[in-house]
Amino acid sequence: MKSIVLWICALISFTAYSQRVEIPDKNFEQALIDLKIDSDGLVNGYLLKRDAELMTSLDISNRPIKDLTGIEAFTSLLYLYCFDNQLSHLDLKDNTGLMVVLTDVNELIPPNGMILDMLWFD
């Protein structure tokens, strides 16, 4: 009986953890909190996946963000405004619905061979 309870607790813990998205950049997470997207309101290194999935537009411009790890969870995103930050890398391969991306005033270097089929201002 004890092993069944432990197994159920482990399963619940794994399920809860898999519903989180890592957000290692504190400034990115603070922007999500300020925009009322991060529902727990804490800078704790993660965002609930459900908080990101319904967003169609995200404006995180004019913040000292260096890393957008976690942006891949924004699967419904159509518009991303992230200009005037400190980004050097931007991986949007999982954000297939994006129509507009504004990245001006960053330090972005497109990967070799990348064909940009979106607005790219840099």
Image (cartoon, rainbow, N blue to C red):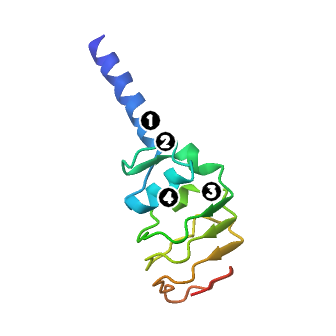
Q: Which residue is mark 3?
A: 75
- Residue nearest the viewer, comparing 42 with 7: 42
Tell me which amino acid carries mark 1: Ala
- Residue at horizontal 49 percent and vertical 58 percent from the top: 31
Alpha-carbon span between mark 4 and mark 1: 23 Å
Alpha-carbon span between mark 2 and mark 3: 14 Å
When asked about the image quadrant of residue 50, the answer is top right
| Residue 66, horizontal then vertical, whole percent | 41, 71
Alpha-carbon span between mark 1 and mark 2: 5 Å
Mark 1 touches mark 2? (CB < 8 Å)? yes
Tell me which amino acid carries mark 2: Gln
- Residue at horizontal 66 percent and vertical 49 percent from the top: 54
Farthest residue toward the top? 1
- Residue nearest the viewer, comparing 69 with 37: 37
Mark 1: few/some/many CA within 10 Å (<14, 14-19, 20+): few
Q: In the image, which disc is placed on residue 31?
A: 4
- Residue at horizontal 65 percent and vertical 53 percent from the top: 55
